[in-house]
Image: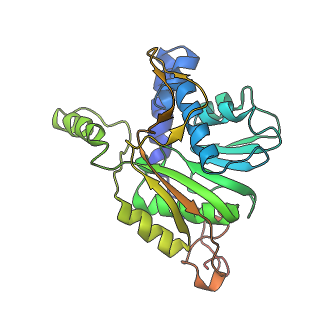
Amino acid sequence: MGTRSFHFVEDYRTLVRQLIAHLPLPEAMSRAVGGDFTAMGQIERQLLIGYGLKPDHTLVDVGCGAGRLAKQLVDYLASGRVLGTDVVPELIDYAKIGCPPTWQFTVVEDIRIPFAENEADFASFFSVFTHLLFEESFCYLLEARRVVKPGGTIVFSFLEFEQNWQVFNDAYKALRHGLPQLHLTTFMDRTACEAWARHLGMLIIDIRAGTDTFIELPGPVVHDDGSRSKGKVAFGQSVCVLRNDKVPREKRVLSWETSWDIGSSPTSSQMR
């Protein structure tokens, strides 16, 4: 990958710094990750618990933003930890607030997960692949395969046209009227999930549409507008859940196998 600069770094740093310049910090941090900071963090937490996240697990939260998910896991991961990454330093600084000192939050400017092999039980990518090119998302899944333990779980959200047409329509209208696009918005279908899983040597455990009410809430969740969600709720984006069935190295897709070598030329031993 050489020393290329990825589009998402400048896109999101510019967006966040504009928000910080015009809003109180807590509001800027919430808007930077789509708003509804507390409610969505609680929903993300329950989604992961529903797929097997345990109190002693280590979770890699890629695109952790301002810590929306991490802050809601402080009490639950009593003997576990979160390893969060994001491209925006200001978001990382905010994510650390209120989290245990053993949890790590790291600024990453390229496609890598800077943690050791087999270090995590879970990896999550919430609203990450929705803003990346397909090749970039696949590279991130290769990194997740390395970092997550054999049999561990990888969860990512994605946009489908049928369930998220309003998002697409808003982007279309902005383009039609000559309005600037703050960042890339990517849609995909389930055949991409199936192809990625097959080439990664992973098993799809579940795929849910953004409108499916499958996330069990233990109590009411209060949204920014004062409305409440309870019982089973939808996530809003589609969700794919993979099991990390690590295939032998000789059968793996060629890739950069060590995160610290992303951005430089890999050696032959790393391209397995």
Q: Residue furthest bottom?
A: 250
Q: Is residue 120 in sight in this rendering?
A: yes
Q: Residue furthest left?
A: 176
- At 47% from the left and 35% from the top, the residue drawn is 233
Q: Residue furthest front?
A: 231
How is the model colour-coded? rainbow
Q: Is residue 1 in sight in this rendering?
A: no
| Residue 169 percent location from the top left of the image | 23, 38
- At 49% from the left and 52% from the top, the residue drawn is 5
| Residue 64 percent location from the top left of the image | 60, 40
Q: Name the image quarter holding residue 191.
A: bottom left
Residue 34 vertical position relative to residue 270 in the rendered view, above or below = above
**Viewer-closest of 225 and 2:** 225
Q: Name the image quarter holding residue 166.
A: top left
Q: Name the image quarter holding residue 37.
A: top right
**Viewer-closest of 10 and 165:** 165
Q: Locate residue 16 relative to residue 60 in the image: left or right.
A: left
- At 74% from the left and 33% from the top, the residue drawn is 74
**Viewer-closest of 211 and 183:** 211
Q: Locate residue 158 relative to residue 38 in the image: left or right.
A: left
| Residue 171 percent location from the top left of the image | 26, 38
Total residue callouts: 0
**Viewer-closest of 88 and 83:** 83
Q: Locate residue 5 relative to residue 268 in the image: left or right.
A: left
Q: Quadrant of the C terminus?
A: bottom right
Residue 5 vertical position relative to residue 16 in the rendered view, above or below = below
| Residue 226 percent location from the top left of the image | 46, 14
- At 61% from the left and 38% from the top, the residue drawn is 45
